[in-house]
Amino acid sequence: MSQTRVLDVEGLDVRIGRHHLLHDLTFTIDRGERVGLIGESGSGKSLTSLTLLGLLPEDARVDGSVRLAGVGADLASASERQWSRVRGGEVAMVFQEPMTALNPTMRVGDQLAEAITLHRDRSGAGTDRRAVRARVVELLDQVGLPDPADAARAYPHQLSGGQRQRVVVAIALANDPALLVCDEPTTALDVTVQARVLDLIVRGVAARDAAMLFITHDLAVVATVCERVLVMYGGRVVEAGPVQEVFRRPRHRYTEGLLAASDLDAVDAEGRLPTIRGSVPAAGAFPDGCVFRNRCAHATAECATAPPWTGPDPGDGYACHHPAGAGEEQR
């Protein structure tokens, strides 16, 4: 891996039971880079995040490689013991729903202290109770909780949804991870709270010069907080590139459909937004060839074969036989 590379995923395949759910994922994230991962529910976004945290069920079969800066082992084949040293330290996650991410029977300060102590013990650095408690209050103050010492003594149910999510962010950032994975971290929050939590996450990542993978269905959020975007459908990355370039000039027909469905200026005479026909197939039931072909108005017989990746590298390009903009007016 290069000195700036934090995450290197190559040829990642995941099967659970009879279902082949992730197909040949290949992408990288550099230090300080913020990458968005978008797609409809069922496209494989959350499964990708769970794979990167080693949180798959025991019967999952993982092929390919997942390499993280500072970790010698290929994490695609790592044991739970190896993952326990990496998870929460070198890579951490902000989950969607803080009430399920936090232990309702523990004070939030104790949960934060546990995250700090666990990794200090494993590193052999040792722990000092007073120093850990000071660090807990410091982290809660950094994420903007009023009276952080008092907040540390609270149970999760005694905090608001926005405050609980701030605690989850503090736990994720406690050990200065090289990579932060955020899985729909603001979906469960009120609109008025979302912007503040997003700003908190971005500032926390920037202060640590960490890499970030931000998973969401909200294209406006990706345009605001990310520099590069991966578009996922059917367990595959179908398009990737700089956010502004992909959003301004999408090439894959799925990306084109997603953007059209979120364009409030594209409503018809009856006030309806454009839609992508059909729905996402069930897990493992995507068609052969182009996985989007059964929902695409531009599909032909050629689409029964897998489209090649067109672009300089897996981090920039698309896989579509009939790309938007080819022989037609650009968006």
Image (tube, helix red, strand yellow):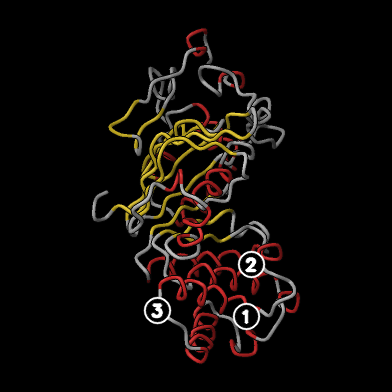
Residue position for label 1: 110
Residue 125 tag number: 3
In the structure shown, which secondary structural element does the residue marked by tag 1 occupy? helix
**Position in image of residue 156 (x %, y %):** 71, 75
Quadrant of image for the C terminus: top left
Determine crowd level at label 2: few under 14, some 14-19, many 20+ residues with C-alpha closer than 10 A: few
**Position in image of residue 290 (x %, y %):** 51, 20
Q: CA distance from mark 1 to mark 2?
A: 29 Å
* Circle 2: residue type: Thr
Indicate whether 164 appears above or below 238.
Answer: below
Indicate whether 242 appears above or below 134.
Answer: above
**Position in image of residue 165 (x %, y %):** 62, 68
Towards the viewer: 75 or 173: 75
Towards the viewer: 311 or 296: 311
- Tell me the quarter of the picture where residue 225 sits: bottom left
Decide if residue 268 is on the left or right side of residue 199.
right
Mark earlier in primary sequence (3, 2): 3
Mark earlier in primary sequence (1, 2): 1
Q: Who's the residue at 45% across and 31% down the image?
A: 24
Q: CA distance from mark 1 to mark 3?
A: 19 Å
Towards the viewer: 109 or 207: 109
Indicate whether 192 appears above or below 287.
Answer: below
* Circle 1: residue type: Asp
Question: Given contact means CB atoms under 8 Å apart, are the residues at marks 1 and 2 in contact?
Answer: no
Q: Nearer the viewer, mark 3 or mark 2?
A: 3
Mark earlier in primary sequence (1, 3): 1
Q: Who's the residue at 46% across and 18% down the image?
A: 306
Q: CA distance from mark 3 to mark 2?
A: 41 Å
Question: Given contact means CB atoms under 8 Å apart, are the residues at marks 3 and 2 in contact?
Answer: no
Residue position for label 2: 192
Towards the viewer: 102 or 290: 102
* Circle 3: residue type: Ala
